[in-house]
Image: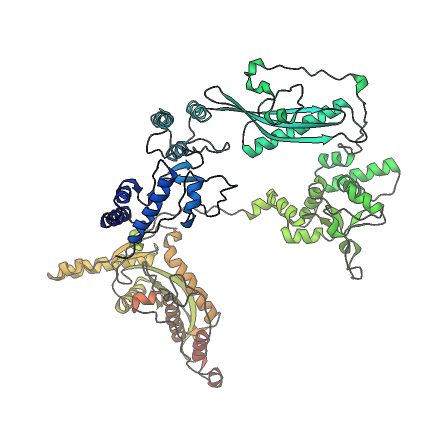
Amino acid sequence: MTVHVFGAISSPTSCIFALNRTADDHRSQFPDVADSVRRNFYVDNYLDSFDSEDEVIQRSRQMKSLLQLGGFNLTKWTSSSRTVIAVLREFVLASPALDLDLDKLPVERTLGVMWDSKRDMLTFKIRKPPNNVTLTKRAFLSIISSVYDPLGLVAPVIFTMKSLLQDIWTNEERIGWDDVVPEILSQRFHCWYDHTQQHLHVFTDASSKGHGAVAYFRTVFEDQSVNVSFVMSKTHVTPVQGLTIPRLELQVVVEGLNITLTICRELEIDLRQGYRPKGCDELIYFHRGPSFLNLDPAEYTWEEITEPEERDVNVIRVLAVKTEDENHVIDRCVVRFSSLLRLQQVLAWSKRFANNTRAKLRDEKPMVGELTELVFAEELYALRKNLELQLRSKLRTFRPFLDEVGLMRIGGRILQAPIDYAAMHPILLPASQLLTKRIIWDHHVRHMNVKTERLLTDLRARFWILFGRKVVKSFINNCWPCKRTSAKPSPPLMASLPVHRLTPHLTACTYTGIDYFGPLTVRVGGRGRRHEKRWVSLFTCLTTRAVHLEVANGLSMEKFLLCFSRFVSLRRKPKVVYSDNGTNFVAAEQELRQALEELTSKHDELPTVMACQQIEWHFSAPHGPHFGGVWERIVQSCKQAMKTSIGNCLVTDQVLRTVIAEVAALLNARPLTHLSVDPEDPDPLTPNHFLYGGARPYLPLQLADVEDMNDNRNSNSGGEVTKLSATYIQV
């Protein structure tokens, strides 16, 4: 064996065996090192400690020499001594790019435990879920399992969490793996995790020269020792124009708040309250923070901030006036009247009474003009001042302009088109205004509840509604008359399929469905031609979907039995038959049963044989054609094929039988499974596979040339058959 399998169950055992065998084979050369191999190796990790640096260097070289004799090359060396690491550079270090003069010694993972090689100390890292993630039993178990402590160095800490996990597991609420842990148990976890109290303190101050803010972390450990660490600071020089001290104080408070929010966001901590000291001067005092942070919070000195006097503040009073009227007369009228015609009449008479004008009775200009004033105020101002519209304006792409009466219309490049001016430059309307909906409703009703495309076309002859298609479609979807006329009944839930539709591994036509369709008119006779009716008897296999068609001269029981006999002779005798509750089917079933009883009563040896050949007949419920969907779908395909082939032509009986035979061949060649686009996939399954054992694709015969049949006086039948042969039919 020259290759070691990685990841197999036997891999650790094989690795340890190979190491021990190497140590035993060369024990005579390296006796002490061989014992270290057997004692201090854990799979592929070697961990050992020595009293002096010279001993470490000597043992490292001996260990590498011994294992090289067995084909093992030790790499990723590290040590807590920089001198040892400098000597071991001749081997492959764990951190090859380590700068011994500038870089810190790395923290390596040893046997699943973090080893700080600089302090020569084992450390453990406990992962805490993010603040926005709820604590579940699954997350809690993951946190406990992430701590690997084979020697029990942090057993007291882990024991507390194991006890909490037991309480979660035995909780009376039966907490699931992804259920949120109750608040009481969650608090116990946070109290255990946050064993240290860490607070963020932000200090601000301002003067006539400048202002600034500085942030510190104050940490209180379990032994009540306090540590203060600097986080960040910001300073600003007072502006040249000068500001009052209260205003500078407010600005520096805002700066302190921004620092606080930045630190809390980046470190994902909660916001704590701050304390305002008297000041800080020296740089060392600035880095270490105020000395009172080492005291208990109860010993802090508080300083109250008084309100500034009126004379120290420059008071600027601003009077703001809102020019837009929320209760505009147009809006009130649109809300009051639901009919656009009535709204036009009221506004026209109101305008005429107020301004003594000649406004037409049904003119939209007064309404639309004031509507655009309310919605497109900025665009109208720019157009009246001959200014360019802003880049953020929704109307910029429409190149709008104002006509002679002040209405906003769509621009364009079709000025020379011989169409109406209103259709060439329609009026712009906002999408969300109630007046727009009134205009849409008026056109919708006047055009007899037309659909989206027609209604939008009629509207754009005069108006251009922003997002018009979306607005019109939403309006039609909420129109109750349209909902009533276009409503479709909910399809009923179909029952389970009968067992005879699902029984596999049987010969085709073992379970058969029967139906009739027609009548079809044919011409018969020579000189004294007459017309007669024919029907088609359809037999379909309920499992393989194979089709057999027979032409019946009538709907009587005798005619059906003849068709049934031909079907049995060509295919096979079915065991179970399903059909509609037609009178001919009921009579045929009774006739077959009566004939069978008479036959078995006359011959003594037949009852046993015929008992195995009886046909079980099932009738659909009266007036329930949906029970026969399996053959109704085939009837539709047959009618479609016959309509494509002979259409409304009056054919002879012989031609009809030929067409029926070719339609049956066409249906039996249809695919039952998905037709793949991959040429390497197998051919789709067809009913012919069950009937003949192969695909047997439908290939119609060319009986004669069409030109020759046109010259033949008696070629009508052949021409009609050729038409079917030359036609592609989709079923």
The front one of 428 and 282 is 282
Q: How many marks?
A: 0
In the image, 222: left or right of 153?
Answer: right
Whether residue 647 is situated above or below residue 343 in the rendered picture: below
The quarter of the image holding the C terminus is bottom left
Instruction: Report the residue that reaches farthest toward the left.
Output: 604
Residue 373, horizontal then vertical, whole percent: 79, 41
Residue 167, horizontal then vertical, whole percent: 35, 25
Residue 449, horizontal then vertical, whole percent: 64, 48
The front one of 32 and 291 is 32
In the image, 6: left or right of 330?
Answer: left
Residue located 80% across and 31% down the image:
240
Instruction: Report the residue that reaches farthest toward the front.
Output: 54
Snapshot colouring: rainbow
The front one of 171 and 76 is 76
Residue located 43% across and 30% down the image:
180
Q: Can residue 70 be seen here?
A: no
Whether residue 402 is situated above or below residue 107 in the rendered picture: below
The front one of 456 and 611 is 456
Q: Can residue 437 be seen here?
A: yes
Residue located 11% across and 62% down the image:
605
The quarter of the image holding the N terminus is bottom left
Q: Quadrant of residue 601?
A: bottom left
In the image, 260: left or right of 497?
Answer: right
Residue 606, horizontal then vertical, whole percent: 13, 61
Whether residue 306 is situated above or below residue 265 in the rendered picture: above
Whether residue 320 is situated above or below residue 670 in the rendered picture: above
Q: Quadrant of residue 535?
A: bottom left
